[in-house]
């Protein structure tokens, strides 16, 4: 199981044990120094607490550190294959989280007009929007958050799929700016005075023949929209 905390935070969870950035740093230091004691010293931690933490992690994730005692070289420690796999899993999760944190969001204020299971309908300055909610109630003031990577930009002439009306949000819009990066094109799109952002590939931009002031349609899944309570 994976867990995402605040921006930049990630953890792998097994039962009640979480493997987080401090644990990853400990394993990397052991791999680098070949010693739990040296790794602990390098990180400014006590050897006893490091050993206790390794035992707790191993109870949840399996054998992580091989410890060799005595001998002419005084013994030492090295990571197991399970530890390497665990570190790789954590690093992939952290990369994914970092990428998510860098994706711009459009944030709208609004009022909940209906709640249907996990989805809420919210009246906003650009019209009604549906999204996943965190326990909101009808009449409550909320924020609607839409990641730029969730938005699909369509030619304005494309007809709406009648079967997608309950699952997707759809708005008519005008392109107000285009920023071309090395791999991704960021499109600024005006909807009734509110600027949305969408991320496209260069191929998609060329196929749509996008330019400033051209008319487009924005569409995105309700399940890719977050409806969150405004903090008081």
Image: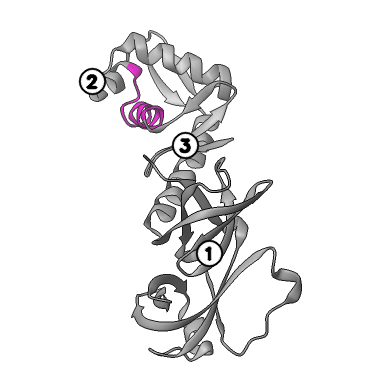
Q: How many marks?
A: 3
Marks 2/3: CA–CA distance: 21 Å
Residue 113 x/y as whole percent: 58, 55
Residue 141 located within the stretch drawn in magenta: no
The residue carrying mark 2 is: 44
Q: Is residue 219 left or right of residue 174?
A: right
Residue 202, numbered label: none
Q: Quadrant of the N terminus?
A: top right
> Which numbered disc covers residue 150?
1
| Mark 2 touches mark 3? (CB < 8 Å) | no
Magenta residue span = 22-36
Q: In the image, what residue occupies the spot 46% across and 49% down?
A: 141
Where residue 34 sits, quadrant-wise, is top left
Q: Nearer the viewer, mark 3 or mark 1?
A: 1
Mark 2 or mark 1: whose residue is earlier in sequence: 2
User: Which label is found at residue 87?
Assistant: 3
Position of 161 with respect to 176 (left or right) is right
Query: Magenta: predominant secondary structure element?
Result: helix
Give the mark nearest the N terminus, 3 or 1: 3
């Amino acid at each position: 199981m994976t867990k995402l905390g605040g921006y930049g935070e990630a953890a792998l969870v097994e039962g009640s044990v979480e493997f987080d950035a401090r644990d990853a740093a400990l394993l990397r230091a052991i791999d680098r120094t070949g010693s739990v004691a040296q790794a602990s010293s390098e990180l400014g931690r006590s050897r006893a607490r490091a050993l206790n933490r390794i035992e707790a992690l191993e109870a949840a994730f399996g054998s992580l550190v091989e410890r060799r005692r005595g001998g002419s070289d005084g013994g030492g420690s090295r990571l197991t294959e399970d530890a390497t796999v665990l570190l790789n899993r954590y690093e992939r999760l952290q990369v994914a989280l970092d990428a998510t944190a860098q994706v711009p969001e459009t944030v709208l204020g609004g009022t909940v007009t209906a709640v249907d299971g996990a989805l809420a309908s919210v009246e906003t300055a650009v019209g009604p929007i549906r999204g996943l909610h965190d326990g909101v109630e009808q009449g409550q003031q909320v924020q609607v958050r839409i990641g730029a990577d969730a938005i699909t930009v369509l030619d304005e002439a494309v007809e709406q799929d009648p079967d997608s009306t309950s699952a997707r949000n759809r708005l008519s819009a005008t392109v107000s700016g285009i920023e071309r990066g090395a791999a991704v094109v960021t499109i600024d799109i005006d909807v009734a005075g509110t600027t949305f952002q969408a991320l496209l590939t260069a191929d998609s931009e060329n196929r749509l023949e996008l330019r400033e002031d051209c008319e487009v349609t924005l569409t995105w899944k309700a399940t890719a929209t977050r409806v969150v309570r405004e903090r008081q």
